[in-house]
Amino acid sequence: MPASKTPKQPKLPLTKRELTVLKLIFREKTNKEIAHQLGITDSGVEFHRKNIYKKTKSKSIVGLVKYALKSGLVKI
Protein backbone atom coordinates (compact mmCIF):
# COMPACT_ATOMS: atom_id res chain seq x y z
CA MET A 1 0.00 0.00 0.00
CA PRO A 2 1.41 3.41 -0.92
CA ALA A 3 1.81 5.90 1.89
CA SER A 4 -0.88 8.53 1.85
CA LYS A 5 0.39 11.95 0.99
CA THR A 6 -0.95 15.01 2.65
CA PRO A 7 -1.26 18.05 0.42
CA LYS A 8 1.45 20.59 1.02
CA GLN A 9 0.36 24.00 2.11
CA PRO A 10 1.70 26.83 -0.02
CA LYS A 11 4.77 28.37 1.54
CA LEU A 12 4.05 31.83 2.83
CA PRO A 13 6.57 34.45 1.78
CA LEU A 14 6.60 36.02 5.24
CA THR A 15 8.98 35.37 8.11
CA LYS A 16 7.65 34.27 11.49
CA ARG A 17 8.15 37.80 12.83
CA GLU A 18 6.32 39.32 9.86
CA LEU A 19 3.44 36.89 10.39
CA THR A 20 3.26 37.94 14.04
CA VAL A 21 3.24 41.61 13.07
CA LEU A 22 0.55 40.97 10.45
CA LYS A 23 -1.67 39.21 13.00
CA LEU A 24 -1.24 42.12 15.42
CA ILE A 25 -2.08 44.61 12.66
CA PHE A 26 -5.20 42.56 11.98
CA ARG A 27 -6.11 42.98 15.67
CA GLU A 28 -5.89 46.77 15.18
CA LYS A 29 -2.73 47.20 17.24
CA THR A 30 -0.71 50.37 16.67
CA ASN A 31 2.99 50.31 15.80
CA LYS A 32 3.73 51.42 19.35
CA GLU A 33 1.62 48.60 20.85
CA ILE A 34 3.20 46.03 18.51
CA ALA A 35 6.69 47.29 19.36
CA HIS A 36 5.99 47.06 23.09
CA GLN A 37 4.52 43.56 22.82
CA LEU A 38 7.41 42.24 20.70
CA GLY A 39 10.17 44.12 22.50
CA ILE A 40 11.34 45.99 19.42
CA THR A 41 11.39 49.65 18.38
CA ASP A 42 8.64 51.48 16.49
CA SER A 43 10.99 51.72 13.52
CA GLY A 44 11.49 47.94 13.71
CA VAL A 45 7.74 47.47 13.40
CA GLU A 46 7.67 49.89 10.47
CA PHE A 47 10.47 47.91 8.80
CA HIS A 48 8.46 44.67 9.12
CA ARG A 49 5.28 46.42 7.98
CA LYS A 50 6.97 47.68 4.80
CA ASN A 51 8.32 44.20 4.07
CA ILE A 52 4.85 42.74 4.57
CA TYR A 53 3.33 45.22 2.11
CA LYS A 54 6.03 44.44 -0.45
CA LYS A 55 5.90 40.65 -0.08
CA THR A 56 2.10 40.47 -0.16
CA LYS A 57 1.88 43.03 -2.97
CA SER A 58 -0.60 44.99 -0.88
CA LYS A 59 -1.16 48.70 -1.30
CA SER A 60 -3.25 49.30 1.80
CA ILE A 61 -4.34 47.86 5.12
CA VAL A 62 -7.36 46.42 3.31
CA GLY A 63 -4.99 44.44 1.08
CA LEU A 64 -3.17 43.11 4.13
CA VAL A 65 -6.45 42.02 5.72
CA LYS A 66 -7.52 40.30 2.49
CA TYR A 67 -4.17 38.50 2.35
CA ALA A 68 -4.44 37.38 5.96
CA LEU A 69 -7.96 36.05 5.43
CA LYS A 70 -7.20 34.31 2.11
CA SER A 71 -4.08 32.71 3.55
CA GLY A 72 -6.00 31.40 6.55
CA LEU A 73 -3.75 33.29 8.95
CA VAL A 74 -6.70 34.83 10.72
CA LYS A 75 -10.39 34.12 11.02
CA ILE A 76 -13.24 36.45 11.65
Image (spheres, rainbow, N blue to C red):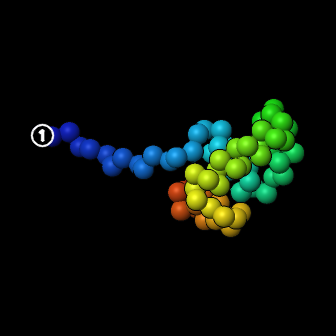
Examine the rendering and report whether any part of residue 75 can be seen. no
Identify the residue at image location x=77%, y=46%: 46
Q: In this view, does 7 lie to the left or right of 48?
A: left
Report which quarter residue 18 is drawn in.
top right
Image height check: is 50 above or below 38? Answer: below
Mark 1: amino acid:
Met
Dot 1 lies on which element? loop
Report which quarter residue 74 is drawn in.
bottom right
Identify the residue at image location x=31%, y=46%: 6
- The quadrant the N terminus occupies is top left
Which residue is at the front of the view, 45 or 2?
Answer: 45
Which residue is at the front of the view, 13 or 38?
Answer: 13
Q: In this view, does 33 lie to the left or right of 48?
A: right
Identify the residue at image location x=74%, y=53%: 25
Examine the rendering and report whether any part of residue 30 can be seen. yes
Residue that numbered label 1 is attached to: 1
- The quadrant the C terminus occupies is bottom right
Image height check: is 36 above or below 53? Answer: above
